[in-house]
Image (cartoon, rainbow, N blue to C red):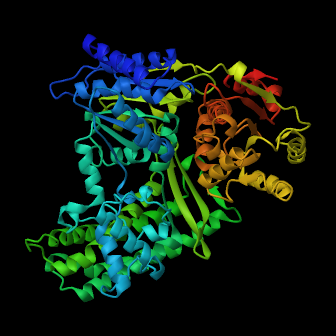
């Protein structure tokens, strides 16, 4: 139970914030603070200080305007400090992460009397590698010849950018974080400047003491609060936990935007490889190994492995040459084919298992070589290669090892067969662009990640808070629990929004002459827009498909050119900037957007007074993971539409409606052009879950 001292401290901190920040006390905010603190206060620990009871995990759906960030910070920070745990705040989007880092935490630190430090945690790929920057500039200057394996030589036109980055980093004007560089850095530019964990030589690197990534890691040691994202948390957990971030047992997690946790986990655990991409890589690997052998005196301990590697690459390429026609035949004229219940054909499984035979010794040889090159970077000179050889070859060979490891994992999972009663794995083939041509990609993904999260996160963490404005689907937490594997004993709470919705806005289900399944629907929505959109105000029109957005844009772009901003034709940030600029000038503006504009975008006040939702945002029906999950649910006698499709659409629809009222002073209306909301039983379920705006 939360001690009286802790309870009084949290209450005192809340009063400090209300007074110093001139905030209005909110009932929902106080409820959220109390429920989180009560849950964390019920944790008991063993002699190692680790949680040993079924307490400390709480789920809070906090309606828009609750002030949930302040609530969970005040409820968790004092407990984390008292129990000597790290508080890790994880978000799904960069926008929220930056708001917490640049606004919420600095304000809190200046406001409350409880001192604390905070630090940002990102994956290695978001940070500058000084060694690679140095090598890129040397290559551009002709000082260093390129070890031409997968890497292309840096482009001459990027020299000015790289030199500016070096100067900014050296002067302290930039911390090496890609996201904090003033301008956008293209992927092909950044690829020369960042290292994977296999390329990184860690403490053996000559730039280790000045490394951007390890400086950020060091800052975490002194931080009470760490800000990260869901992807990084999941990556760390998949490596065993405590590799990049603090160990789960020493951490209290807050998953803001928690409704994205399951989706992020699904994407994280997906494995795939392209047939042509692998054939190209294997040729490069074969050439790279031959270059390495020619350039170095091979120690006896690695000689056999490396001498056999080119032949193993050729054998693997032969297997991929056989895989291509088989995959081509399985696809036929289709762009994608999914295997029922994840069961691939026997001839495909045999081919994949044949790939594993030469891949295993090749992988072992690369692993051994990587270890030897790492050891040879040590200035003590105890390695088996000279220092200059190690410095030239460790990074490219580390990259090769990482590619070989990824291929092994993907092939192994693609060829596996689940035991009777186990959840199936979604497996499919698809055509995908590859340079000027196309490739066939083999993919495998779990259909649910509940078991992984239950084992690696919920059973190990010291405590956790899952929060968002939309955690319930159709007014139930059941879907969230099933998707994320949250324990039965977790606490669940809904905190209503403080907004007076009936007096702030209106919601209308427009009764068009057709519904979205009709060929007439496109003409009907265009006719409605011609007469109902106010060109002097601010409007956001949300589409469920890019094709429909583009078709509607093509109809109106000539007449509405000065008013219309469309996702896909301009960057999101530029659309928002131009939209606000037009509204500030007293002009009207209309945004056509897709899913990413239905969530996370913040246009308060006059910046948004009309939200148009073209149709119920059902998931794409041919998504292979969705289809595999539906197939499994049907086999269990369940209704995939009611158990899967409808709850997901409910969350998306609530998020879309949530764009309108962002503050107590906002007003406007929502128009939904899908009459199925009133003509079907499921439509009425969706309507009942929406904010209680006045219905018209």
**Position of the N terminus by quadrant:** top left
Identify which residue, 578 or 317, lies in the foreground.
578
**Position of the C terminus by quadrant:** top right
Q: Is residue 578 above or below residue 61?
A: below
Query: Would residue 443 be visible to someone looking at this image?
Result: yes
> Residue 455 appears at what percent x and percent y?
35, 35
Residue at the far front in the pictured view: 585
> Residue 509 appears at what percent x and percent y?
81, 29
Q: Which residue does the image show at 34% across and 26% down from the upper left?
A: 76
Identify which residue, 78 or 102, lies in the foreground.
102
Residue 539 falls in which quadrant of the image? top right
Q: Is residue 121 left or right of residue 157?
A: left
Q: Is residue 347 above or below residue 143?
A: above
Q: Which residue does the image show at 34% across and 44% down from the upper left?
A: 237
- The image shows a total of numbered marks equal to 0
Q: Which residue does the image show at 18% across and 66% down from the upper left?
A: 204
Identify which residue, 139 or 22, lies in the foreground.
22
> Residue 347 appears at what percent x and percent y?
53, 63
Q: Is residue 305 left or right of residue 644?
A: left
Q: Is residue 156 above or below residue 319?
A: below
Identify which residue, 89 or 584, lies in the foreground.
584
Query: Would residue 266 be visible to someone looking at this image?
Result: no
Q: Is residue 70 left or right of residue 584?
A: left
Residue at the far top in the pictured view: 4
> Residue 172 appears at what percent x and percent y?
31, 60
Q: Is residue 479 left or right of residue 544?
A: left
Q: Which residue does the image show at 30% across and 57% down from the upper left?
A: 213
Residue 685 falls in which quadrant of the image? top right
């Amino acid at each position: 139970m939360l001690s009286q001292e802790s309870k009084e401290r949290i209450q005192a901190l809340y009063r400090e914030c209300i007074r110093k920040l001139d905030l209005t006390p909110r009932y929902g905010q106080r409820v959220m603070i109390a429920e989180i603190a009560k849950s964390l206060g019920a944790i008991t620990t063993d002699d190692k200080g680790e949680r040993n009871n079924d307490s400390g995990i709480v789920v809070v759906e906090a309606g828009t305007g609750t002030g949930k960030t302040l609530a969970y910070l005040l409820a968790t920070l004092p407990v984390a400090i008292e129990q000597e745990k790290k508080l890790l705040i994880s978000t799904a989007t960069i926008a929220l992460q930056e708001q917490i880092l640049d606004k919420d935490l600095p304000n809190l630190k200046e406001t409350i009397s409880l001192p604390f430090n905070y630090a940002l945690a990102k994956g290695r790929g978001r940070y500058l590698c000084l060694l690679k920057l140095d090598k890129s500039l040397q290559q551009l200057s002709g000082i260093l010849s390129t070890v031409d394996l997968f890497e292309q030589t840096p482009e001459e036109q990027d020299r000015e950018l790289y030199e500016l980055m070096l100067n900014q980093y050296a002067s302290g004007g930039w911390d090496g974080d890609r996201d904090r560089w003033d301008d956008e850095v293209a992927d092909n530019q950044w690829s020369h400047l960042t290292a994977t964990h296999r390329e990184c030589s860690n403490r053996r690197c000559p730039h280790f003491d000045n490394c951007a990534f390890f400086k950020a890691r060091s800052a975490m040691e002194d931080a009470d609060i760490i800000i990260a994202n869901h992807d990084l948390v999941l990556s760390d957990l998949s490596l065993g936990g405590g590799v990049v971030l603090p160990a789960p047992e020493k951490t209290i997690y807050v998953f803001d935007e928690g409704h994205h946790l399951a989706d992020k986990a699904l994407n994280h655990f997906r494995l795939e490889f392209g047939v042509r991409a692998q054939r190209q890589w294997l040729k490069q690997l074969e050439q790279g190994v031959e270059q390495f052998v020619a350039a170095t005196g091979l120690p006896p301990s690695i000689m056999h492995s490396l001498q056999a590697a080119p032949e193993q690459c050729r054998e693997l390429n032969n297997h991929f040459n056989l895989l291509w026609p088989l995959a081509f035949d399985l696809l036929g004229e289709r762009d994608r084919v999914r295997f029922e219940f994840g069961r691939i054909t026997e001839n495909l499984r045999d081919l994949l298992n044949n790939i594993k035979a030469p891949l295993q010794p090749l992988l072992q040889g690369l692993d051994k070589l990587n270890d030897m090159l790492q050891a040879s970077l040590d200035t003590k000179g105890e390695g088996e290669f000279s220092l200059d050889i190690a410095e030239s070859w460790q990074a490219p060979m580390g990259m090769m090892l990482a590619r070989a490891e990824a291929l092994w994992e993907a092939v192994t999972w693609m060829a596996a067969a689940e035991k009777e009663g186990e959840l199936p794995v979604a497996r499919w083939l698809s055509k995908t662009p590859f340079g000027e041509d196309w490739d066939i990609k083999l993919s495998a993904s779990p259909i649910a990640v509940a078991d992984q999260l239950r084992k690696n996160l919920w059973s190990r963490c010291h405590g956790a808070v899952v929060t968002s404005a939309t955690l319930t689907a159709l007014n139930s937490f059941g879907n969230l629990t099933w998707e994320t594997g949250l324990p039965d004993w977790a606490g669940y709470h809904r905190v209503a929004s403080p907004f007076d919705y009936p007096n702030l806005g209106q919601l209308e289900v427009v009764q068009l002459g057709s519904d979205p399944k009709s060929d007439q629907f496109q003409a009907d929505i265009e006719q409605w827009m011609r007469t109902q959109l106010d060109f002097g105000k601010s409007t956001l029109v949300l589409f469920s498909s890019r094709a429909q957005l583009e078709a509607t844009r093509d109809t109106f772009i000539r007449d509405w050119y000065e008013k219309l901003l469309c996702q896909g034709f301009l960057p999101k940030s530029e659309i928002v900037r131009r939209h606000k600029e037009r509204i500030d000038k007293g002009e009207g503006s209309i945004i056509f957007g897709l899913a990413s504009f239905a969530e996370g975008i913040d246009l308060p006040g006059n910046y948004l007074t009309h939200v148009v939702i073209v149709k119920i945002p059902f998931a794409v029906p041919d998504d292979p993971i969705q289809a595999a999950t539906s197939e499994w649910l049907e086999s269990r006698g369940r209704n995939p539409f009611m158990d899967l499709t409808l709850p997901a659409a409910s969350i998306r629809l609530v998020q879309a409606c949530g764009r309108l009222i962002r503050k107590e002073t906002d007003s406007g209306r929502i128009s939904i052009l899908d009459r199925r909301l009133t003509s079907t039983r499921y439509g009425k379920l969706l309507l009942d879950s929406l904010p209680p705006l006045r219905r018209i």
